[in-house]
Amino acid sequence: MTSTFTSLFRKTASCPTSQALLAFRGSLMGPEGLTLIESHLASCDFCSAELQLLSRYRSEAEESSFVEMPAQLRRLAEALLKRSAAPFKGLPAFAEHHQLSH
């Protein structure tokens, strides 16, 4: 049996997204948006808890760089992909030697 509290402690369609909560935390939205989220937080324990959780982590996007795949690894990957995309050649031989059932 679920308690009333656990059944109410969830994100609903009327809840702001995590991105909106992050924007709220960083004051990256207009006054109307800030007011809407403030009033929502006053009545939604789930979003208040989510905002606390999000506040514990850096909101800045981590910088990442893409590195070129080593040539040997690229050739291996391409060979494996070509091999997996090729049709299975053993099926005609299998059909000749075994009776297929329906």
Image (spheres, rainbow, N blue to C red):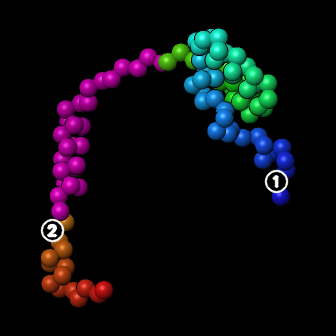
| Front residue of this view, candidates 35 and 41 | 35
Residue 26's tag is none
Work out whether mark 1 precedes mark 2 in sequence or the reverse, and give the earlier one: 1
Residue at the spot 30% in from the left edge and 24% down from the top edge: 67
| Front residue of this view, candidates 80 and 4 | 4
Give the CA separation, mark 1 to mark 2. 55 Å
On screen, residue 46 versus residue 87, left or right, reads right
| Front residue of this view, candidates 21 and 87 | 21
Residue 73 place in picture, x, y as percent: 24, 37
Look at the image and tell me in which quarter the C terminus lies: bottom left
Q: State yes or no: residue 69 in magenta.
A: yes
Q: Which residue is mark 2?
A: 89
Q: Give the magenta range.
A: 62-87
Q: Is residue 90 above or below residue 6?
A: below
Residue at the spot 21% in from the left edge and 55% down from the top edge: 85
Mark 1 surroundings: few (<14), some (14-19) or many (≥20) residues within 10 A: few
Q: Is residue 47 above or below residue 56?
A: below
Residue 49 place in picture, x, y as percent: 74, 29
Query: Mark 2: which secondary structure?
Result: loop
Query: Mark 1: which secondary structure?
Result: loop
Q: Amino acid at mark 2?
A: Lys
Q: Which residue is mark 1?
A: 2
Q: State yes or no: residue 76 in magenta.
A: yes
* Residue 49 in sight from this viewpoint: no
Look at the image and tell me in which quarter the N terminus lies: bottom right
Q: Amino acid at mark 1?
A: Thr
